[in-house]
Image: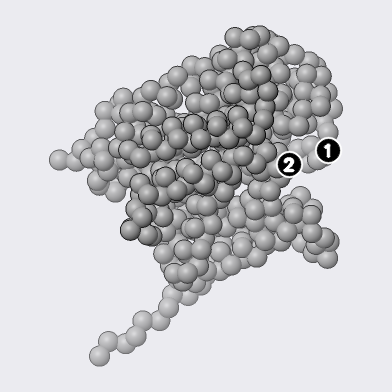
Amino acid sequence: MEKRLTVMDTLSVGFMTFAFFLGAGNMIFPPMAGFLAGDNYFPAMIGFLCTAVGLPLLGLIAVAKAGGSIPVITAKLPAWIGATIACAIFIIIGPAFAAPRAGLVAYEMGAVPFLNGDNATTQALYSVIFFGIAMLLALFPGKLVDSVGKVLTPALIVLFAILALAAFIFPQDPIVAAQGGYESGAFTKGFLEGYGTMDALASLVFGMLIVDLLRKKGITESGQQAKYLGIAAIIAAVGLSFVYVPLFYLGATSSVLGAGADTGGAILTTFVNQVFGAYGVVMLGAVVTLACLTTVIGLLSACSDYFGELLPKIGYRGFVVINALFCAVVANVGLSQLITISIPVLMAVYPIAMALIAFCFVRPYLQNERAGLIMMVAVSTLFGVIDGVKAAGVNTDALNFLPFYDVGMAWLLPTLLATFVALFAKASPQPAMR
């Protein structure tokens, strides 16, 4: 008889998935995007939801369809290419960018307001404590559902619900005209802004982590795993939308309050201080710290699980310690500097992740999976690198004839075309039987 999860356990897995995604980028990007989008905040928000909610949802479903995460999805590629893609994604969403950024946001929004001064010593000490706690929780992955899904996430939801209601009940300023790229291309600008959350990349990683946790709960049949992963994906998507919509509106109605802010975190902190005073700052610190902590726990667990299998002599627990230490070091880079560095990398890598997700959906219709996947990955990599180099400030105007090049999406049509062509790639001929 196949084992089933109780309703409470199912909700806990879903809440845990939501909490893993809800981290630093989810809190700081929407307020700034809404502030800049102004009266175009709605199309900008829809574009943002496509990449920050839609793609993670598709990524989790892709993992369910493939029966595994990145190593399984890339199994048809030459081994070294698959390993390179997997390592790059795990490093980006782990110790290089996403996890340290979460620690930085937790420090700047959850600790600095309560300190007498912000200096390198306090930041270093906070990083050690923050990533030390995350490391201890990640060292015991069997406890993740209980510690995150049943304890941390419900507290996070309650605290954020208060903040979300305040955004709609107490708008601070009138909505004004859009600024910059949001004036004429709000949807596209919002779509690209959603890259910053890194959640499409994370979905390819968290999916397998959730499957492993389901196995520990006794769910071993692949169909049941796909079912519960799908439910978790829907819960996470609804939860993320619940976060983004009020934060976008908060930014759009902070035209005066947000003037001079360099990040969405500054807008959010100013709003909370204005509406709730000192108690509000404490509440925001709790929300941000919980959100960032749960995300880092998930990232440390997923990355360490992958690298632990590659190098079993070090193992899962060894890599949890290594990754946590590395994150604590990188987190001492300034938040704005880390975001600036990450943008070109994300512009280059995101198209590859989208190609992998698309492959999972078209795979049943491919006659030659290997040729189709190689074609999709090669094209998305080539044009993703073009977008990444452009985002890094290198002059690539000679390529401005490419469709959507000007908005940083030169990869889109070529990758769609490669996916279409892959459907017609012939199956490899089988040797004759003797």
Q: Horizontal and vertical percent for residue 279?
A: 59, 9
Quick check: 51 left or right of 184? left
Q: Residue at x 79, y 59 (%)?
A: 394
Q: Residue at x 61, y 32 (%)?
A: 121
Quadrant position of the N terminus in the picture: top left
Check the image and report above or below for 7 versus 209.
above
Check the image and report above or below for 45 versus 201.
above
Q: Is residue 39 visible?
A: no
Q: Which residue is mark 2?
A: 189
Q: Which residue is mark 1?
A: 180
Q: Nearer the viewer, residue 296 or 381?
A: 296
Q: Nearer the viewer, residue 288 or 370?
A: 288
- Disc 1 and disc 2: Cα gap in Å? 10 Å
Badge 2 marks a residue whose secondary structure is helix
Quick check: 258 left or right of 380? right
Quadrant position of the C terminus in the picture: bottom left
Q: Residue at x 26, y 32 (%)?
A: 5
Q: Horizontal and vertical percent for residue 143?
A: 31, 33
The answer to whether the residue labelled 1 contacts the one labelled 2, judged by CB atoms less than 8 Å apart, is yes
Check the image and report above or below for 339 versus 86.
above
Chain-order first, disc 1 or disc 2: 1
The image quadrant that residue 36 belongs to is top right
Q: Horizontal and vertical percent for residue 212?
A: 32, 45
Q: Horizontal and vertical percent for residue 99?
A: 53, 41
Amino acid type for the residue under numbered disc 2: Lys
Amino acid type for the residue under numbered disc 1: Gly
Instruction: Give neighbour class at mark 1: few <14, some 14-19, many 20+ (Cα, 10 Å).
Output: few
The image quadrant that residue 225 belongs to is top left
Badge 1 marks a residue whose secondary structure is helix
